[in-house]
Image (cartoon, rainbow, N blue to C red):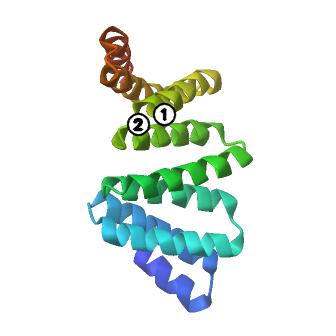
Amino acid sequence: LYQQALAEGLAVGNVLVVGRARRGLGILSRKKGDTENAIRHLTQALAAFRQMGEVREQARVLTSLGRARHARGEYEYSLNAHTEALTLFESLSDRWRVVQSLTDIGECHQALYDIVSALHYHEKALKLAYEYGANLLKPEIQRNLGVDMVDQGRYDEGLVYLHLALDGA
């Protein structure tokens, strides 16, 4: 379906359709474990949305690109993509995706062994998740906070968050 949309979008020069088709192909490729094609499609989608000035679409692609880069172990690239996505989602007042971006940024810091920064972003994400009612995101954030705290040697606090995550999952 995405291949067909891409072909039709390219044939008529519809940049929005091309960008969305490439984003879809990128997400599917990442879920199949093909991060090389995921990054290629997502980078092309990002270029299309930047050309159009489609801020929300750029932010969504940056999130997917950050996740693809993270899966590939390219944590600095992932961090940059998620940080840019956060800035865009904040400009759009998209609260749910702000919380998700903060969580993604925290996970990048975990992968980079910067536990102090990871903890900072995860605490901020959890605070906003409670404020905004983003209940579906809480278990993931609590799990991350538990891991952050255990990594800092704060075992009792970490276990509390890990249990909360299990209870909420």
Q: Where is residue 158 in the image (x, y as percent from the top left)?
A: 35, 16
Q: Where is residue 55 in the image (x, y as percent from the top left)?
A: 68, 60
The picture quadrant where one finds residue 124 is top right
Amino acid type, label 2 = Asp
Q: Which residue is drawn at 54% across and 43% down?
A: 101
Residue that badge 2 annotates: 114
Amino acid type, label 1 = Ser
Q: Residue at x 49, y 29 (%)?
A: 122
In the image: residue 95, left or right of residue 113:
right
In the image: residue 12, left or right of residue 73:
right
Element type at mark 1: helix
Q: How crowded is mark 1: few (under 14 residues within 10 Å), some or many (20 or more)?
A: some
Q: Position of residue 4 (x, y in %)?
A: 44, 80
Residue that badge 1 annotates: 117
Q: Disc 2 vs disc 1: Cβ atoms closer than 8 Å?
A: yes
Q: Which of 65 and 25 is in front in this view?
A: 65
The picture quadrant where one finds residue 35 is bottom left
Q: Which of 74 and 45 is in front in this view?
A: 74
Q: Which residue is drawn at 41% across and 36% down?
A: 114
Task: Relative to 168, say whether 35 is above or below.
Answer: below
